[in-house]
Amino acid sequence: MEPLVSMRGVVKRYKRGSESIQVLHNLDLEVQPGEFLALMGPSGSGKTTLLNLIGGLDRPSDGEVVVAGEHIDDLSGGQLARWRARHVGFVFQFYHLMPTLSAERNVELPLLLTRLSGAQRRQSVAAALELVGLTDRRKHKPSELSGGQQQRVAIARAIVTDPTLLVCDEPTGDLDRETAEEILGLLQLLNREQGKTIVMVTHDPKAAQFASRVVHLDKGALAAAPAEAA
Amino acid sequence: MHPLRQILVATALALRTLPQRLGPSTVTVVGVATVVAVMVCILAIGQGVRRFVDVNDQEDRAVLLPAGGASEFAGAFTTGDVAVLQSAPGVKRTADGRRMIQPLAAVGVEVIRRKDGAPQNEMLRGTGEIGNLMNKSTLHIVQGRMFRAGMHELVAGKTAHDLFRGLDVGDKIDIRGAPWTVVGVYADEGGIDENSLAGDVETIKAAFGNTTYQSIGVQLASPSDYRRFRDWVMSNPQLNAQVKTLGQYYRDQMKQLRVLFDFVGFFVGGVMAVGAAAGAITTLYAAVDARLREIATLRAIGFGGGSVVASIIIEALALAIPGALIGVGIAALGFNGHGIDTAGLAFQASVTPGLALTGVGVALAIGLIGGLFPAIRAARLPVAEALRAS
C-alpha cells in the first residue's frame, strides 16, 4: 500500500542569530493510510518539528516530504496553505479556538475555505459536533466551555472538512487524566471507525497507548521500533 | 477557495476583538481625529482667504494698476489717463451711453479696533457713481444709505464696522482734520470689500491733496473682452499701467497669506499625521501580537497570508474612518465660519466639502500606513512558532 506520509532524508535546521541548529537529522518515516501514529520523545527531540513538517506548517531544510501524493516541500506558502485546507486537520494542545466565535462558528471556519453552500456547511458542522458529542453546546463560546469541551470543538473543527490526515500536537497536554482519556478515546474512535489517519505528538506514554504505532525520537532521529497498539 | 470570503472572515474576527483592545484603539481614533481636526482647521483658514477673495470675483471687471506696483495704493493716474481709456475696446456703457470707467482713490485712514482699542490703518476707497454701478448685486447697503458726491460722507463695510469703533451710522470720524459722517454700512457676502470704507473719489482726492488717482476700475462688456482690453492698454504708450481682473488682483494680494496658511496646514498636519501613523502602527503591532495565535491558527487552517494582510489593513482603516469623521466633524462644527482677524483683515474660516474629503483622505492614508507594517509582519509570521507561543 502507498504510504500516506513519506519522508526521505529529512533535515531541519533553524537559524539562531549566526548559529545554525540542526533539529532533525536525515530522517526517514512512513505513515500508512488509516494508521494512528504517536510521536514520542523528550523535550527538544524534534517531535513537534517533525509534526509541523508532516502537517505542512513548515518546510524541511533538506530531504523530501510527500503527503497524500503531494511533494509538499516544493510548495510555495500560498500553495501550502491551500494544501493544508484540503488535506490536514489540526488539533493543538491549547485548542486555539477563536474566543469571539461560538463552537459551531469555530467548527465552520475551515469550511469557509471551501465552495460549500451555507446549508451544506451547517449540515457538516452539525455532523462534526454530533460526532464529538457537543451538539447541545454549539452556541457556546470557548470561555463558556470546559477544557475537554474546547478540545472536542477543536477536534470537530479538524475533522469537519473530512481531511486526509489529522495532526495532533499534545492534544491532551492541557487536560486532566479523565478528560484526556475521553479525548484520546475520541481520536481512537475517529481512527478506527472513520478510518482517519492520525499523527499525534505526545510526551505521555499512556496517551501513546491509544495509538496503533509509536515512534520515538531522540536528538532529531528515530530511536526505536513501533510499539503495539493499546 | 474564496479570497474575498477569507478576507471577510479574517476581518470580522479582527473587528470582533476590538472591544478587547478598546484603550489602544481609542487612542488611535483620537490621534487620527486630532490630526484631521487640526489640519482641516488650519486649511480652513487658507480656504477662508480664498473664499474671501473669490466672493468678489468679477471676470468682467478690470482694474488698471501702476506698471511697476502690485498695490492699488501705489498708482498715480491722471485725468489724462482716464481720457485716453475712453477709446479702449470692450468697455461697457451705462444706460445713458457713458463708458463705465471709474478712477479710484485708495488712502489709509486711522480707525480704532473694538477689541483692544489699538489704532489701525484701514483702506478708504474713493469711488463714484459709475463705480457704484459696477458693484455686484450682492454688494448692498444693510444700514443707512449710500454716500453722496461732494460730501464728507462715507459708508463702512460690514466687517470693518464690526471690527472697529466709530463706524456706526451717524458716527463721525476725523479725516485730515475734517469730520466725515458714516452714512451707511454695506455687506458683500463676507468678501474682502467688506473690510474697507468707501466715499466719493473727488472729495477724498481733495481732502488728501492728491492730484492723481491710485487705480482705475473698468466694467467690460463681457469677460471675453478682457484680453482685448488688456492688450490694448498694455500696448498703449500713453498708459504706464498693468491690467488685471478684479478677482486676479485680489488673489495676487492674498496669495502670500493663502500660501502661508496652506503651508502651515499641510506642514503641521503632515508632522502630526506622521505621529498618528506611528501611533496606529504601535496599536496594530500590539493587536497583531495579542492575536498572534489566532492569526497563526487561521493560517494553519488554510487562510492565505493575503487575507490576513487585508484584514489588518481593513482594521486600521476601520479605526481611521471614525477618527476622520470625528476630526472633520469637530472642524466643521467648531471652526466653519469662525472669524479670523489677522494681518489687518477679517474673514471667516471655511470648511468646504473638498477640505472634508482631504481630511478623510489623510486619515485613510494614516490607517493604510499604520496597518501596512503590522499586516506584513502578521503575514510573515512563522506559523508553527506562533502556534506554540504562550
Image (cartoon, coloured by chain):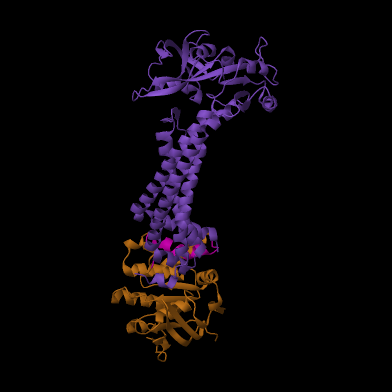
Whether residue A82 is in magenta: the answer is: no
Letter of the chain shown purple in the rendering: B
**Residue drawn at (34%, 23%) of the image:** B117
x and y percent of residue A216 in the render? 39, 87
Q: Quadrant of the N terminus of chain A?
A: bottom right
| Relative vertical location of residue B178 with respect to residue A21 in this rendering, above or below | above
Residue A113 screen position, x and y as percent:
52, 64
Residue B9: x percent and y percent? Answer: 47, 58
The residue that appears at 46% across and 71% down in the rendered structure is: A159
Q: Quadrant of residue A185?
A: bottom left
The residue closer to the viewer here, A139 or A2, is: A2
Q: Colour of chain A?
A: orange
Q: Position of residue B168 (x, y in %)?
A: 40, 14
Q: Is residue B347 above or below residue B177?
A: below
One can see residue A138 in this view: no
Magenta run includes residue A100: yes
* Magenta-colored span: A96-116
The C terminus of chain A, quarter of image: bottom left
Counting the numbered discs, the total is 0
